[in-house]
């Protein structure tokens, strides 16, 4: 790996970026910087590593767009094809003309006839909902972010190819760029790939796809996907400035400074700047911390982009050594607070009977040991146990089951992996934080306040379609 300075990036700038991320307690999992096609810096917050397969959420949409581009290259479809022609089995008896007029191009640029995504988690066939939801405006006119558009596009690719869209892309594009052989995609309820949100791959995989697009479809001298399609996909195809954005291409966002980017919920990012030959990528879980990517993107502009030089810089061994050390010590941060409090002895091991509450929890207790603790509770599913760290995060599994795994709509008995930590934020208040680190990402935060023999509880979650049982207030007594 080249030094940052040899690629025109000060090591001190990367160090400042990392310090700001941790200072602002951004829940980042990994970052990778590319300059002129080379890795300038890369790091992961333990327990994440370069080999960790990570949920990419809506970055998946950009991959689907490239699959469509490959289909166009193969002469299988065209941008002007009406999408309804591929789904005679899903059309209503008298489809609205806005539906039948919708083209592949319209769906690529999020100019569908719908004002919102047509499906919910309870629908059995997401592509069907696109054709059977009453439209609100002509297609190809206004930008409206619609994940059902991506579901339909991915389904077109899979109907023609006869295999999941990632499998279709492998020999043509993904294998040549070194994309992980074990990458995969969560399925929609009807069994097709959930290309709108479900790709599971590594940060390096995402960075390589971004680099391919920055290089207009070429890799090691081979044109893997047509330059014309990549140019169009990464260019502004429709205005979305009313939402504070700078344009949208084909399932790819336009960025400031003539950039383009893949963006996913929770701050999965690949921001590409052709004029600077610079790519910033990261994986994270910032759900619930404001608009996707805000803190990370601001730090990227201030600490990294602003410091890019057009020529190599003088080597800075001291700064580079400090950066190397900082990267080696990156770790997901625990809850900030004290390791113990004056009430620990009086509450440890004592069961609290909880009054009826939205979480359905009927009793709970805590036990403590140096650097760790255990939360035991009973809810509608039965007795549950969660281990947490104090002053550190502890990996484990979240005890609730019945959530989705490989396919949306199909509950599983397999619990989600998690990281958990807690700390005393005052003498009577224990705050608990749980980060779900599975193929679904999310968080649970809980505050337990002890007052004599009584306990007050507040729980809040940020997660798509799970942890619903962990929101609300409760009270109880020993």
Image: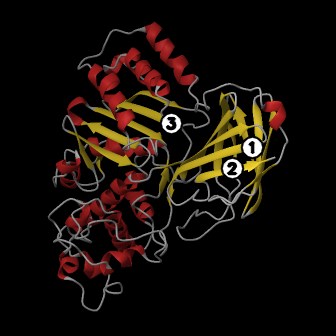
Vertical comparison of 219 with 162: above or below: above
Q: Residues within 10 Å of mark 2 (few under 14, many from 20)?
A: some
Q: Nearer the viewer, mark 3 or mark 1?
A: 1
Say which residue label 2 marks.
475
The crowding category of the residue bearing disc 3, from other C-alpha atoms within 10 Å (few below 14, some 14 to 19, many at least 20), is many
Q: Which residue is mark 3?
A: 27
Q: Nearer the viewer, mark 2 or mark 3?
A: 2
The x and y percentages for residue 142 are: 17, 61
Q: Does residue 168 sit above or below 57 in this rendering?
A: below
Q: CA distance from mark 2 to mark 3?
A: 30 Å
Q: Do residues under tags 2 and 1 come within 8 Å of each other at their CB atoms?
A: yes
Quadrant, the N terminus: top left
Nearer to me, 351 or 151: 351
Kindly identify the residue that appears in the image at 61 percent across and 46 percent down. Answer: 458
Q: Is residue 237 left or right of residue 56?
A: left
Query: Which quadrant of the structure image shows residue 133?
Result: bottom left
Residue nearer the viewer, 216 or 112:
112
Instruction: In the rendered structure, find residue 100 and report the number of the disc placed on it.
Output: none
Dot 3 falls on a residue whose secondary structure is loop
Q: Residues within 10 Å of mark 1 (few under 14, many from 20)?
A: some
For residue 162, side relative to residue 437 (left or right): left
In primary-sequence order, the first of circles 3 and 1 is 3
Residue 69 at least partly seen = yes
Q: Percent from the top left, x then y, of residue 311?
A: 25, 17
Residue 454, labelled with which disc? 1
Q: Residue at x 30, y 44 (%)?
A: 261
């Amino acid at each position: 790996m080249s030094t940052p300075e040899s690629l025109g990036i000060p090591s001190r700038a990367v160090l400042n970026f990392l310090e700001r991320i941790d200072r602002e307690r951004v829940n980042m999992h990994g970052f990778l910087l590319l300059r002129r096609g080379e890795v300038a810096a890369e790091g992961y917050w333990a327990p994440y590593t370069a080999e960790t397969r990570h949920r990419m959420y809506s970055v998946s949409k950009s991959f689907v767009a490239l699959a469509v581009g490959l289909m166009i290259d193969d002469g299988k479809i065209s941008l002007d094809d009406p999408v309804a022609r591929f789904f005679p089995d899903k059309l209503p008896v008298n489809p609205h003309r806005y539906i039948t007029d919708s083209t592949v191009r319209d769906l690529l640029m999020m100019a569908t006839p719908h004002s919102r995504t047509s499906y919910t988690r309870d629908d059995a066939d997401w592509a069907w909902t696109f054709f059977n939801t009453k439209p609100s405006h002509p297609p190809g006119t206004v930008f409206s972010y619609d994940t059902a558009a991506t579901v339909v596009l991915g389904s077109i690719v899979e109907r023609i190819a006869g295999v999941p869209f990632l499998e279709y892309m492998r020999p043509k594009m993904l294998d040549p760029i070194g994309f992980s052989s074990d990458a995969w995609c969560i399925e929609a309820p009807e069994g097709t790939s959930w290309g709108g949100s479900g790709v599971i791959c590594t940060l390096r995989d995402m960075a390589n796809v971004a680099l391919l697009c920055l290089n207009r479809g070429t890799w090691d001298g081979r044109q893997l996907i047509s330059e014309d399609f990549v140019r169009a996909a990464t260019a502004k195809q429709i205005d979305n400035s009313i939402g504070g954005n700078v344009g949208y291409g084909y399932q790819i966002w336009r960025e400031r400074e003539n950039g383009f980017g893949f963006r996913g919920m929770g701050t999965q990012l690949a921001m590409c700047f052709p004029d600077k030959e610079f790519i910033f990528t990261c994986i994270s879980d910032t759900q619930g911390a404001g608009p996707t990517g805000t803190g990370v993107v601001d730090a990227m502009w201030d600490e990294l982009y602003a410091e890019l030089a057009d020529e190599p810089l003088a080597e800075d061994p001291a700064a580079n050594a400090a950066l190397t050390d900082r990267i080696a010590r990156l770790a997901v941060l625990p809850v900030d607070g004290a390791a113990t409090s004056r009430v620990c002895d009086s509450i440890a091991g004592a069961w609290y009977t909880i009054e009826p509450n939205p979480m359905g929890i009927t009793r709970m207790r805590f036990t403590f040991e140096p650097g760790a603790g255990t939360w035991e509770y009973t809810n509608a599913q039965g007795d549950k146990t969660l281990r947490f760290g104090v002053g550190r995060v502890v990996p484990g599994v979240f005890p609730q089951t019945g959530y989705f795994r490989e396919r949306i709509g199909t509950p599983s008995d397999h619990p989600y992996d998690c990281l958990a930590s807690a700390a005393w934020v005052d003498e009577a208040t224990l705050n608990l934080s749980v980060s779900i680190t599975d193929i679904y990402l999310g968080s649970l935060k809980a505050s337990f306040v002890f007052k004599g023999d009584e306990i007050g509880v507040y729980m809040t979650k940020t997660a798509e379609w799970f942890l619903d049982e962990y929101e609300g207030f409760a009270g109880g007594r020993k």
